[in-house]
């Protein structure tokens, strides 16, 4: 049984990670043994939620690494803190499950890679949507072959954030210092989802980043990207914090194949649909009825719970982690290529 210490116990842990942790505890696979968070409010709320003894609730994660009875840490803190915390956890000999992204820059990512390799600790980054029922179903449909080879992919994450969520003093995601911005925070998931469903790595990126609605922030609120995959196929990913309309569901992915198409609209009651041949309508697909799609956890719409369960199961059996450090670095390398492409106004090759 894994003894997990949480580095960060804020909203994402209490709302979405909790689904996975509660399932792991119920299945006897894990114990949430300790918690570190600078916020007294988070320590109290998450500590009560997971039944963590008060003497195992720390203000400083380094104290937790030194004294708590844990073998695994789960990092869920602002992006800019990941490198320091992951390196310290590796030095302490703990297995690491990190929220995305693994770091803010490739230099930071390489520092993490060096630390986990030097100290020989397991490491993974949460690419949760790949473990959500809609994406698992989409992958099964593409593998079944009726839609043909994917030719063109598209992903969007469109939101309409209130002004208070784009003030760096109220939300770290609006702060360059903390590693925020629409590109790295909002489009991250669509990048790996589209790439995975297309079945070919992204090698070239063209992009434009801009701050269009919230001029007081020092990060982008809009990101538009075009990708060329390793085999020449194409895809696009867009993210914005100011464009969601009444009829738009915000986050979706569309994959066009040679013989049909599939569509994911995550917040719909029926999020997965397909259109085969020359059909001019969408046919709803229940991912749970498809072959080889593992049943999801109740309430786990984002796949966070399923990912955490898969990561802990991998640790328990000593097998490969569901997302490797190399895969997480590659996703960050696409983001870095988009930054450079926008700054230089030209296509950029993804760092390998």
Image (spheres, helix red, strand yellow):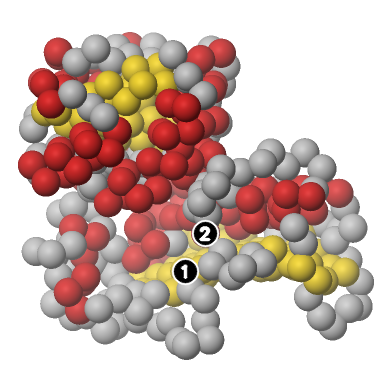
Residue 291 lies left or right of residue 8; in this view the side is right
State which tag comes first along the sequence, 1 or 2. Answer: 1
Query: In the rendered view, would you say 255 is above or below 200?
Result: below
Instruction: Compare residues 151 and 44 and report the one nearer the observer.
Output: 44
Mark-to-mark CA distance, 1 and 2: 7 Å
Q: Quadrant of residue 96?
A: top left
Residue 152, relative to residue 349: is it above or below? Answer: below
Q: In the image shown, does 161 or 229 lie closer to the viewer?
A: 161
Residue picked out by circle 2 = 190
Which residue is drawn at the image coordinates 73% and 49% (left, top)? 288
Residue at 39% over, 62% down: 186
**Dividing the picture into quarters, in which one does residue 73 lie?**
top left
Q: Is residue 106 visible?
A: no
Query: Foreground: 83 or 339?
Result: 83
Badge count:
2
- Crowdedness near tag 1: few (<14), some (14–19) or many (≥20) residues, C-alpha within 10 Å: many
Structural crowding at the residue carrying mark 2, measured as other residues with C-alpha within 10 Å and reported as few (<14), some (14–19) or many (≥20):
many
State the image coordinates of residue 293 (x, y, percent, origin top left). Answer: 72, 42
Residue 304, image x, y percentages: 47, 44
Q: Examine the rendering and report whether any part of residue 321 can be seen.
A: yes
The residue where tag 1 is placed is 157
């Amino acid at each position: 049984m894994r003894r997990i210490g949480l580095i960060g116990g804020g909203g994402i842990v209490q709302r979405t990670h909790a689904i996975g942790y509660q399932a792991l505890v119920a299945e006897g696979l894990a114990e949430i043994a300790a918690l570190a968070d600078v916020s007294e409010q988070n320590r109290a709320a998450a500590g009560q939620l997971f039944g963590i003894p008060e003497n195992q609730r720390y203000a400083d994660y380094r104290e937790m690494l030194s004294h708590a009875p844990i073998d695994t840490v789960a990092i869920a803190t602002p992006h800019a803190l990941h490198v320091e915390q992951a390196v310290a956890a590796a030095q302490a000999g703990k297995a690491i499950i990190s929220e995305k992204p693994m770091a803010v820059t490739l230099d930071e990512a390489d520092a993490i890679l060096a630390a986990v390799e030097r100290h020989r600790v397991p490491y993974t980054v949460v690419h949760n949507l790949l473990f959500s029922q809609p994406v698992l179903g989409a992958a099964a449909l593409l593998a079944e072959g009726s839609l043909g080879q994917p030719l063109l992919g598209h992903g969007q994450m469109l939101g309409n954030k209130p002004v208070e969520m784009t003030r760096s003093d109220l939300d770290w995601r609006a702060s360059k210092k903390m590693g925020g911005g629409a590109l790295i925070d909002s489009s991250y998931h669509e990048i790996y989802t589209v790439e995975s469903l297309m079945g070919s790595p992204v090698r070239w990126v063209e992009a434009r980043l801009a701050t269009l609605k919230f001029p007081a922030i020092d990060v982008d609120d809009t990101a538009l990207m075009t990708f060329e995959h390793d085999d020449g196929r194409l895809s696009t990913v867009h993210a914005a914090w100011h464009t969601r309309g009444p009829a738009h569901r915000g986050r979706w992915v569309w994959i066009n194949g040679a013989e049909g198409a599939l569509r994911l609209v995550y917040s719909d009651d029926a999020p997965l649909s397909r259109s085969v041949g020359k059909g001019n309508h969408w046919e709803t697909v229940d991912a749970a009825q498809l072959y080889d799609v593992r049943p999801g956890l109740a309430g786990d719409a984002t796949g966070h719970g399923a990912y955490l369960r898969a990561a802990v199961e991998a640790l328990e059996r000593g097998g490969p982690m569901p997302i490797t450090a190399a895969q997480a670095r590659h996703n960050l390398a696409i983001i870095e290529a988009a930054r450079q492409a926008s700054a230089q106004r030209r296509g950029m090759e993804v760092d390998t």
